[in-house]
Amino acid sequence: MNRNILITGGAGFIGSHVVRLFVNKYPGYNIINLDKLTYAGNLANLKDIEDRPNYKFIKADICDYDRMREIISSNQIDGIIHLAAESHVDRSIKDPFTFARTNVMGTLSLLQAAKEYWESLQEKYKGKLFYHISTDEVYGALALTHPEGVVAPFTTKASSEDDMAYGTEFFLETTKYNPHSPYSASKASSDHFVRAYHDTYGMPTIVTNCSNNYGPFQFPEKLIPLFINNIRQGKPLPVYGKGENVRDWLFVEDHARAIDLIFHKGKVAETYNIGGFNEWKNIDLIKVIIKTVDRLLGNPEGYSDHLITFVTDRLGHDMRYAIDSRKLQAELGWEPSLQFEEGIEKTVRWYLDNQDWMDDITSGDYLTYYREMYSL
Ligand code: NAD
Ligand code: DAU
C-alpha cells in the first residue's frame, strides 16, 4: 500500500531510528522527515538513507501553523508520527518557555493543520492517524520503596530472571498524570491536546508513553552518551545528588519497533506504555558504563572509577520511573529484543567507533555541515 507519512523530529535521536526503520521496511511508503534542526537535530544521523527514493527531508518549525497546513496538504499526508519536541529536562528547568512553545503550541499547530486537511477530504478521517510520542515522565515519580532492588513483583516474557524493581508501583496507562518538571508538564499538556482532538473532532489518534531510551545517535547532553564521552576523555562524571534515582531503560531500536507495530496495529484512541522492565539506579548504571568503556579501551578494571563526581542535585529530580508495558505485550505481542547487557555493550561500542560523529557535535561542526550541504 502506498502511504504518505510525516515523521516530525526525524533528525533527532529516536526520530532518526524511526525514519530509518520506515524507509528500509516500507519502500512503498513516502517518508517525509520534518525537522527544525534545533541544536538536537543532526542530519548526519540519517546519512545511510538520505538518498533513498522514498525519503524526503523538510526543514520546518512545527509551530509555524501555515507551513504545517501547506506541508500536510501538498504531500497528501495520511499518517503522522509526531516526535519533534524539546526533550532535555535540565534545559526545561532553565528555559521553560521554549518547551511550552514547541511541545504545546507546536503539537497544537500540527493537530489543527492535520484536522483542517483531513476534514477537507471526501473520505475525511478514514485511513488517517495522528500518532503522538510521549514519555513516562508525565505520570510523575514513583517511590523508592526497595532501595536495594527486589526481583520484580511480576515477570513477563520480556523481563529476564534477575530484572530488578526498586518499588512495588509501576506506571500503567491508567495512572493519573502528575508531571513535575517543565519538560514533563509540557509533554503532559501536549498529550491532553492530542486526546482532546480525538474526543472533540473524532480525529484518529494514539498516544504512547515510553521509558528512557538509550542507543546510537543520542545527543551527548543525556546521561549515557555524555558519560561515555567523558570517560573516554578522562573528564569528571557529574552524578546528580547521590545517584540513587532510578530509571527504566529501553534500547532505542526496540522503541522504534514498538512505534512501527502500534502505528500499523494499534487501536485508535488508545494509550500504550512502552518499556522493558529494566530499572537501574543511576550509580549502578554508571558503574556498568565505566566498566564497559574501560574494558573496550583496554584500560585495567577500576581505571576510570575516580571520575565519578557527586554534584548538586537536579531541581525537582524525579526519584523513580518504572513502566508496566504488559498491555502492549499482551495486545500487540511486542517485546524488547535485547537484554540490557547486550544493549549497553552495543551502545558503548557504537560511541567509541563513531568518534567523528561525537566530535562533530562537541565542536559544533554539525551545526553547519548539513545546513551548508542542503543550503539551509
Ligand atoms: P531529541 O531532542 O533527540 O530530538 C528532537 C528532534 O525534534 C530534533 O531533531 C529537533 O531538531 C526537533 N525539533 C525540536 N523542536 C522542533 C520544532 N519546533 N519543529 C520541528 N522540529 C523540532 O529527542 P528524542 O530523545 O529523540 O525524543 C523524541 C521524542 O520522544 C520527544 O517527543 C520525547 O519527548 C519523546 N521521548 C523521548 C524519550 C527518551 O528517552 N529520549 C523517552 C520517551 C519519549
Ligand atoms: O523517561 C523518559 C525521559 O528520559 C524522556 O522523556 C526524556 O526526553 C529523556 O531526556 C529522559 O529523561 P531523564 O531526565 O531521565 O534523562 P537524562 O539522561 O537527562 O538523565 C537520566 C538520569 O541521570 C536522571 O536521573 C538524571 C541523571 N543525570 C543526568 C545527567 C545528564 C546525572 O546524574 N548526571 C547528568 O549529567
Image (cartoon, rainbow, N blue to C red):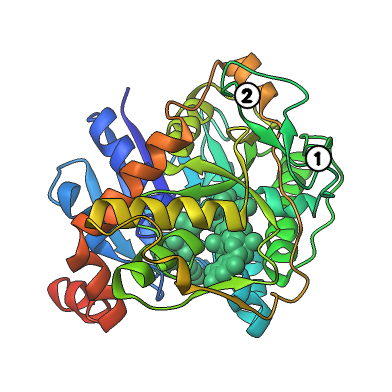
- Mark 2 or 1, nearer chain start: 1
Residue 353 in picture, x, y percent from top left: 19, 55
Residue 309 in picture, x, y percent from top left: 55, 76
Looking at the picture, tell me which residue is in the foreground, 301 or 332: 301
Query: What residue sits 16% from the left and 48% below the top?
Result: 48
In whole angstroms, how far apart are the C-alphas of marks 2 and 1? 21 Å
| Residue 276, quarter of picture | top right
Query: What residue sits 78% from the left and 48% below the top?
Result: 147
User: Considering the numbered disc 2 on the image, is that residue within a helix, a strand or a loop?
Assistant: helix
Report the residue marked by disc 2. Answer: 328
Report the residue marked by disc 1. Answer: 167
| Residue 227, quarter of picture | bottom left
Q: Nearer the viewer, mark 2 or mark 1?
A: 1
Query: What residue sits 69% from the left and 38% below the top?
Result: 323
- For this view, does 105 lie left or right of residue 296? right
- Please say whether residue 69 is visible from this viewpoint: no
Mark number for residue 230?
Answer: none
Circle 1: residue type: Gly
User: Considering the numbered disc 1 on the image, is that residue within a helix, a strand or a loop?
Assistant: loop
Q: Indicate yes or no: mark 2 CB to ligand 1 under 8 Å.
A: no
Looking at the picture, tell me which residue is in the foreground, 134 or 303: 303
Query: What residue sits 46% from the left and 30% below the top?
Result: 339
Circle 2: residue type: Leu
Residue 122 in picture, x, y percent from top left: 52, 33
- For this view, does 230 lie left or right of residue 339? left
- Please say whether residue 344 is visible from this viewpoint: yes
Which quarter of the figure is the N terminus placed in? top left
